[in-house]
Image (cartoon, grey):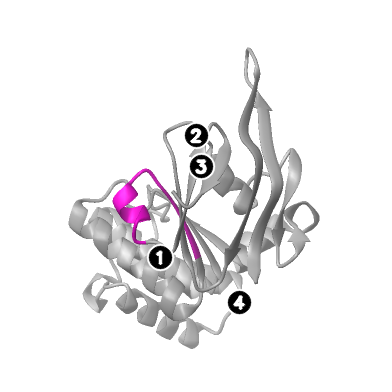
Amino acid sequence: MDILTAKNASFAYQNKSQTVRAVREVSCGFELGKCYAIVGKSGSGKTTLLSLLAGLELPTEGEILFDGKSTAQIDCDEYRRDHAAVIYQNYNLFPLLTAEENVLYPLKLKKAERAASKEAAKRHLNAVGIDDSKFKRFPSQLSGGEQQRVAIARTLAAGNRIILADEPTGNLDITNGEQVVEILLRLAHEENRCVIIVTHDLEIASQTDEVFMMRDGMLEQDI
């Protein structure tokens, strides 16, 4: 059963000279326990679709459904905090917080007990390959691969069932990129999360369970 569904979803905006239809009548569904890839050239609409799925934008036509409820009818801030996390190419860590503090942040928002939160942060950081010696380092003191793994650990700590990753390997070398993809696949297949990766890399896409191709704002399945 789909946890996230697009039903004839479109998104258009006005620039200086014309109306741009970035996403056109997209219909698709996403299940827990599977990893998906959305691929396409720059300007194809894939990142805009991810924004719609994340509740960062609302469709101008059609709808996005989370557990059968339209994102137009729910609190999208709460949706992202508790259910759908976005992992960005540039990591989006808080620069003045340590690796451990970044992972603790969503637990503080949920008012979780401090001792249990610190144990959870340690467990999730270790699970993505960050050892204890790096817990007190700031993002600027970590490599790109380490920063992305901290971002994933923060998502794990929040307990989100849906993980939306926007070019998560775009700033990483081949080795670190492969490690990040392995983690995301494991989250889908071993922890029953719904993982959706926007990528231009067909090698990454080939490792996922299902691939969607975006062309001119339209979605094609199983490339």
- CA separation in Å, label 2 and label 1: 26 Å
The magenta-colored residue range is 195-207
Q: Amino acid at mark 1?
A: Ile
The secondary structure type at the circle numbered 1 is helix
Q: Whole-percent x and y of residue 183?
A: 34, 69
Q: Are marks 3 and 4 in contact (CB under 8 Å)?
A: no
Q: Residue furthest right?
A: 73
Frontmost residue, 83 versus 18: 18
The x and y percentages for residue 141 are 24, 57
Q: Amino acid at mark 3?
A: Lys
For label 4, count other residues whose C-alpha is less than 10 Å away and answer few (under 14), some (14-19) or many (20+): few
Q: Is residue 175 above or below residue 124?
A: above
Amino acid found under the numbered disc labelled 4: Lys
Q: Nearer the viewer, mark 1 or mark 3?
A: 3
Of the numbered discs in the image, which one, if any, rests on residue 46?
A: 3
Residue 3, how many percent across, how many down? Answer: 64, 67
Label 4 sits on a secondary structure element that is loop
**Structural distance between the alpha carbons of marks 1 and 3:** 21 Å
User: Mark 4 highlights which residue?
Assistant: 111
Cβ atoms under marks 2 and 3 closer than 8 Å: yes
Q: Is residue 22 visible?
A: yes
Q: Earlier in the sequence, mark 2 or mark 1?
A: 2
Q: Is residue 135 above or below residue 11?
A: below
Q: Looking at the figure, which quarter contains the N terminus?
A: bottom right
What's the residue at 67%, 28% (across, down)? 13
Report the Cα–Cα distance between label 1 and label 4: 20 Å
Q: Earlier in the sequence, mark 1 or mark 3?
A: 3
Residue that badge 1 annotates? 152
The disc at residue 44 is: 2
Upstream in sequence: badge 4 or badge 2: 2
Is 180 situated left or right of 173 in this image?
A: right
Tag 1 near tag 4, CB within 8 Å: no
